[in-house]
Image (spheres, rainbow, N blue to C red):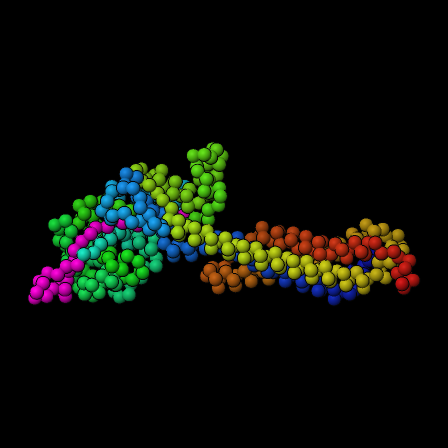
Amino acid sequence: MFLRLVTDSIRRRPRHKLLTGAALALGMAVVTAALSVSLDVGDRLSHEFRSLGANLLVTPQADTLPLEIGGVDYRPVNAGAYLPESDLPKIKTVFWHNNIIGFAPILDVPVRAWTKASQTPITPVYSVSANLIGTWLAHPVTLADGAIFSTGIEKTNPWWRLDQGQWFADSSAECVVGKKFAERAHVEPGDPLNIEAQKQNIALKVTGILTTGGPEDDAIIAPISISQQLASKPKQYRQLYVSALTKPEDDFARRNPAAMTPEETERWICTPYVSSIAYSIKEVLPGTDVRVIRRVAEGEGRILSKVRTLLWLVTLAALLAAALAVGASSAASVIERRTEIGLMKALGAGRGMVGFLLAAELLLLAVVGGAIGYTLGIFLARLVGEKIFGVAPQPSLLVLVVIVGLATTVTLLGSALPLRRAARYEPAPILRGE
């Protein structure tokens, strides 16, 4: 008789069960989507942030005193020492070599430049002063294991775009010029450009007009072999820009490695902080000073922290809404089932037994609602991931376990007061209809 009463109680009144299950499923769907995107957002945003440019700058350690304002190096372009180009493949031997997605050496040379269009009868050779920036465009680098790694300014400065023409070819007598320089020197794509520096003359073909919004708009950009020839510095460079996928720095990352214990140092090196990657690069490139471009690294950290905070707030709001919905549904269910609870107690069921039976029913709903919510949440996460990042996050067994656990916790917390009230019902007043 008692078991039949319990079974009939569970089978009847499906309305509240459906409401509870629906509330849990919707809440867990939002939580699943937020958690899936949150677990994946770090890597996705790190790739997106690389459009901001390089986040590490390598210069000679024996260089002149650094003069940096707002992350911009204002030292004279021809001041200081030089570094060998032959050491650059070593960058891909550091612990976090897979996180280094690109690097580009830079060698600047002050030059005088002119074209036929700038010549007049009064001034047969009218030249303009400019800065020639030698670098790599899409340069193949042979690594220690024999693999070929293509890198250059396209990876470290992806926002550089050509208004006209096309990029130069590496190891060619070609160049692109900034928009402002093109206006000053009356240059168009296809024009020959004469360059003079340190009593050396060289003719380059202009292949495109560049706009960056920076000092490059008034400069000439050419293969680094051209600037090395003009500066009489074969196979050498002055600066190296490195673009690496990193984890935003926290208080631990900003600590001085010299003051860390061996365990802390190992943890610091084994975390892809921009400072730990800089430390690794400095170890493989002797005689260098590797600095973090703070305006890029700190901007990445702030944006990622805000995105994750927003996702956590959405998760907490969904959990709170689900708990309130479960509580309201449980309270209504307990009120409607007062007679059944009174009969169970009259037949000998104690407070613990009544609470256990009701809680078991709710936990079953929690598991089913959590599983349905996880399924819906995966579709929602894929939609959000594809719309925002272009790549959908992958389903995770860990997220499923967490979702079922959260659904169980939310159900127990939301229904705690109604269950307590049901367990304290006295059968006599209920059976008398009071």
- Determine the residue positioned at 67% across, 62% down: 23
Q: Quadrant of residue 395?
A: bottom right
- Part of the protein shown in magenta: 99-128
Q: Position of residue 141 (x, y in %)?
A: 30, 47
Q: Position of residue 8 (x, y in %)?
A: 81, 61
Closer to us: 232 or 141: 232
Question: In which quadrant of the rendered image does the C terminus lie?
Answer: bottom right
Q: Position of residue 411 (x, y in %)?
A: 70, 56
Q: Is residue 336 left or right of residue 118?
A: right
Q: Is residue 103 above or below residue 114?
A: above
- Determine the residue positioned at 36% across, 41% down: 281
Q: Quadrant of residue 53?
A: bottom left
Q: Is residue 255 above or below residue 412?
A: above
Q: Is residue 391 above or below residue 144?
A: below
Does the image show residue 232? yes
Does the image show residue 1? no
Q: Position of residue 319 (x, y in %)?
A: 64, 57
Residue 107 highlighted magenta (yes or no)? yes
Q: Is residue 225 left or right of residue 263?
A: left
Residue 280 highlighted magenta (yes or no)? no
Q: Quadrant of residue 269?
A: top left
Question: In which quadrant of the rendered image does the N terminus lie?
Answer: bottom right
